Each structure stands twice: as C-alpha cells, then as structure tokens.
Amino acid sequence: MKRIKLERVIIITIAMTIIGGLQSWYDHVTIGSMFSLGESEIYKFQTALLFNLISGASGGLVASITLNFIDDKYRTKPYYQGLIIIVSMFMLVWAIRNTIEAFILMETEPAKGFVFAFDAIDMRNIIFWMTIVLLSYFFLQMENKFGPGKLTQIFFGKYNIPREEERIFMFLDLKSSTTIAENLGGVRYHQFLKELFSDITTPILETEGEIYQYVGDEVVLSWPTEGSGNLNYIKCFFAIQQLLKSEENKYLQRFGVKPYFKAGAHHGTVIAGEIGVVKRDITYSGDVLNTTARIQSMCNELHSSFLISNDLFDLNPIPYSDWIIERKGEIQLKGKSETIELMSIYKY
C-alpha cells in the first residue's frame, strides 16, 4: 500500500509540474500572438515559468497527499464527502498561492503595496486546475471501482479480444458466516462485511493481489503466474489473518464477533476478456475457478484454514523454514471425476 501511495504522489506531482510548465508556455505564446496587446512591463517568461513549475509541483504534492488521505479515511464514505475535502483543500492552496504572488509583485512594484489579485485570469486558472484535480479524484475513484490498473487495461483495449492467461486464484470465505448473519441481521451484517472487506484491502494490495469478485461473504483474489515466486498468495492470506487478529477488539465491540477466513488456492489457464456494454468488466473463465472453489469448500472437512493444490505447490515450492506444510493426500472434489492432492499451510 505504501508503494501504491508513493507512486500516486510521484505521478500526480510530475504530471502537474509538466502541466504548469505547459500552461506557462501557452500563456507566453498567447501573449505574443497578434490578438494580444503584448507583454506588460512586469511580465517575464522565465519568472512565470519558474513560478508555475513550483506551483504545479507543490499543488500536485498537496493534491496527491490529499487523495491518499481521502483513500485512507473516506474509502467507505459517500463520494461527495471526499469531494468537499479536495475542493476545500484546493481553494486553500490557491489562496496561499495568490498571497505569495502578491508578495512577489509587491517586491517588484513597492508603490502599489500588497494587492491580493483576483481577476479573470485567476478565474480561468481556478477552473483549469480545479478540472485537473477533479479528474485526478475521478480517476482515483474509478481505479478503486475497477481495481488498480483495470481502467487503463480497458482504455487501451488489452482484453478487447479474449486471451489465455496463467493465473493463481484464491477463494477467501468467511468462517461461520451463516451464524454471524443470523446474529447480526441483514443491515448490520452488510455493515460488518463492508468494514471487513475494506480492512482486508490493504494486505491484498500490499501483496499485489487483484480483487476479482465479491460473492456474498466470499472474496475471489488473483495473481499472475509470472513473477509469483515470492508466494504473494500465501503472504496475503496470513497477512489478512494477522490483521484480523490485531483488530479483534474493534470487531468485538462493534459487532460482537471475531472474523476469520478460510481459503483455497489453485492455478491454471483462464480465458480473460472484456464482457458487457453497460458496466463493462474484465472477466475470467475456466475450470480453475471451479476447482479453486471446490478446494476451499474442503477446509472444514479437512480441518484446515488454508488449502492449496499440489500443482500450485510444485509451481512455486514453499520453503518449509517459513511455513508448516501438511499433505492431506489425494482428495475427490465434488463434481470432479479425478482426485487432486491437497496441502494445508500453517504459519509458525
């Protein structure tokens, strides 16, 4: 999550710095055009460029930090609340910017004194930069809606034509979900799931997981097979369990339960492609999804919180020094004609 936040800060800051420079160049070209009265005595392109680059960089830094704050604290809140914060912060930064500009002009023309300018050019700049900031906020919300990187993939049509991919899937299922739902009731149970899924998002993103689907009280996660030698799917599961352990008191106080997950993981070939016109999305189809769901369903019967297939184990051998591995033998999964060897993973 820290990496994602840092990348966001760097990208937005660089982008706004570049936009600030382009705006200075546009103003300079406009001033020199036949439709302009020409440069004023106090205008200097180098000064304007430097000021706009600094404004763009500082504004981008503040905007990106504000977006990270909204993403942290207002992830489950209505969008308008985040919008109010970012607009308020924008106007505050703009007021500070114009105050600094007034002091600079006062040094240039001491006779005029301190003048806080607000004219047509300021209105143009406010509308221009406000649009940039709001587009950044909109893009952040769309990234959260579709998942990191998904919006870019849809935009460039990566999955416009279906393609085969090798992927790892993990099905996370809430333990004792029926009992919890009965005790909490419909509305409270939904609030519980909303907070729970929000909390586990951080370890999922930190282990580079993709949230493929929410299915009731179940979460389907995925990782590309390439580069998965770091065993992120295992790190993800135990990071989630550790997080929930640390948050036990919060859930006990608010909902009277201690949430924990059981999971099954497997890998295989899927067909990945865009589907739908309204609510377009990227979907995966293939037997690996059904098999992974069946593996997860065996957790209670085999007295394990985390089961993986031997095929997945062979793909990236798990170091016995880091985790306890217990072989469960060849298991007949429901709806499958062939048996599959399963393994249970525990943390020391």
Image (spheres, grey):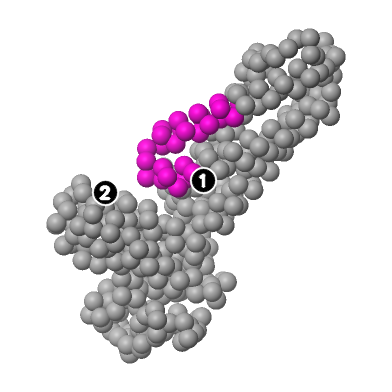
Q: CA distance from mark 2 to mark 1?
A: 23 Å
Q: Which of 100 and 157 lies nearest the eye of the viewer?
A: 100
Q: Which quadrant: the C terminus?
A: bottom left
Dot placed on the residue nearer the N-terminal end, 2 or 1: 1
Q: Is residue 250 above or below residue 340?
A: above
Mark 2 highlights which residue?
191
Residue occupying image coordinates x 33% and y 66%: 245
Q: Quadrant of residue 304?
A: bottom left
Report x, y in % for residue 39. Answer: 84, 16
Report x, y in % for residue 133. Answer: 57, 34
Q: Is residue 53 left or right of residue 175?
A: right
Q: Is residue 44 above or below residue 224?
A: above
Residue occupying image coordinates x 21% and y 49%: 188
Q: Secondary structure at mark 1?
A: helix
Residue range highlighted in magenta: 69-94
Residue occupying image coordinates x 37% and y 84%: 343
Residue occupying image coordinates x 36% and y 87%: 326
**Membership of 119 in magenta stretch:** no
Residue type (three-letter) at the residue carrying disc 1: Asn
Q: Which mark is residue 68?
A: 1
Report x, y in % for residue 320. Answer: 46, 87
Residue 328: tell me if it is visible.
yes
Q: Residues within 10 Å of mark 1 (few under 14, many from 20)?
A: some
Report x, y in % for residue 183. Answer: 14, 56
Residue 30: tell me if it is visible.
no
- Provide the major secondary structure of the magenta segment: helix
**Membership of 85 in magenta stretch:** yes
